[in-house]
Amino acid sequence: MNPTHDIAASTPIWENALGRMKVRIDETMQSSLPGFPHYADPTTGQWVTSADGFWTGGFWIGELWLAGRYWNEPAYFHAAEDALRRLAPRIHSKSVFRGFLFYYGAVLGAQLANSSAAYEIAVRSGQTLAKAFNPTVGLIPLGTEAEEAHKVGDDESNIDGVIASPLLLWTANATRDENIRKIALAHAYKNAEFCVQPDGSVIQSASFDPANGRVVRRYTHKGSSPSAIWTRAQAWAMLGFSLCAMLAPEEKRLLALAEKVADWWIENIPPDLVAYWDFSVQKTADTKRDTSGTAIAAAALLKLSALHPDRNKAAHLAQVAQDTVLALVQRHLTPTTPADKRPPGILADGCFDPNNGVAPANELIWGDYYLLEALGVLTGRLDAQA
């Protein structure tokens, strides 16, 4: 692993990186895109958009909420509210990935901007999502409209969907609804049962019998093989359980799960700290990295550090997070060299779907979001537990 770096000494680097990302956000705002930014050409910065937000539209709105907080410019909040209104019809989509859309699209606005519109949408989205819970199985299934899944329906789940639990926990806390809280915790723990392996590695997906909850098979559909440890599966587990532990601090088991999957990440990342797209794939000079999964993990490590009661362990987690962010901003956030003519503020080398040749080395909106979040924590603009 790379040598550690003092956070104070790195502060000018963090500020410079934030400045580059602000330029990118401003240019995206001003470009009048026909939909929500999804992924972009890392050379030109041209965005591919999704009309309805897919599972990723909340991250663009989340960036706007963060930008408004970081730079105290109301225009970002206004743009976020406008985009959230366009996303609001997705409240009723039959997809567990509503957790992604409305935790970042709405909860963040309620917390960071005190937006009444965001608060209302956040509550409605959480209440509606809770209705999809299958009490026999103990979780919210993928749903018939889940985006990007290998197989959708009410007999499938994957670890990506654990992000539903933070939305539900926030909703339960906001409305004092104990039933939603129980659903949120059951969903988190069942996902752990289905996907977290004894050594802390994460298998992405599970098929189950919806009548009795019995697992039919466990598999990874986005990785290099059905038994592979796909990078974003590991990162989503780190983030999901850390967020849950933050929102339900009395549930010490959630903190233990977050630590378990984070420890596996730290033990298995490459020496330069930027993960390949799949931990199990054979590594060659051409193997793609995934800066988006790495950014998710860095953000998760910062949250876990803020939560962990052992201050030595917390300091270690924070240091790995800082070193990871440093690797991202120095080697992957444009421009990376004086000769780099790409538009500034692009987090390049995000690997979306290499199995299908979709955006295998691109800017990915969720990678941008998590790097922006992590930089906010490292510069003191954002509480790690926000």
Image (spheres, helix red, strand yellow):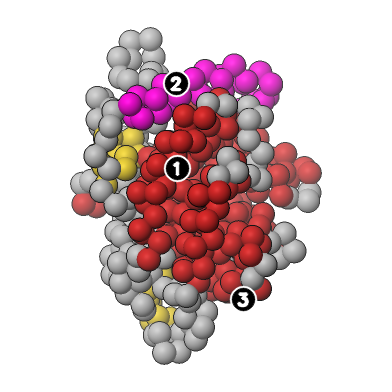
Are dots 1 and 3 in contact, CB under 8 Å?
no
What mark, if any, has residue 179 been given in the picture? 3
Find numbered disc 3 in the image and state the secondary structure of the residue it sits on: helix
Determine the CA span between mark 1 and mark 3: 29 Å
Q: Is residue 129 magenta?
A: no
CA separation in Å, label 3 and label 2: 44 Å
* Callout 3 amino acid: Asn
Q: Are marks 1 and 2 in contact (CB under 8 Å)?
A: no
User: Residue 74 appears at what percent x and percent y?
Assistant: 52, 30
Provide the secondary structure element on which disc 2 rests: helix
Residue positioned 39% across, 55% down in the render: 88
Q: Which residues are magenta?
A: 1-30
Q: Residues within 10 Å of mark 2 (few under 14, many from 20)?
A: some
In the visual, does 48 lie left or right of 103?
A: left
* Residue 2 in magenta stretch: yes
Residue beneath the point at 51% across and 68% down: 127
> Which residue is drawn at the image coordinates 57% and 69% (left, top)?
184
Q: Is residue 211 above or below residue 274?
A: below
Q: Amino acid at mark 1?
A: Glu
Question: Where, by quadrant of the figure, is residue 109 drawn?
Answer: top right
Quadrant in the rendering for residue 317: top right
Q: Is residue 149 left or right of residue 326?
A: left
The circle on residue 20 is 2
Give the main secondary structure of the magenta stretch: helix
Label 2 near label 3: C-beta < 8 Å?
Answer: no
Which numbered disc flags the more N-terminal residue, 1 or 3? 1
Q: Secondary structure at mark 1?
A: helix
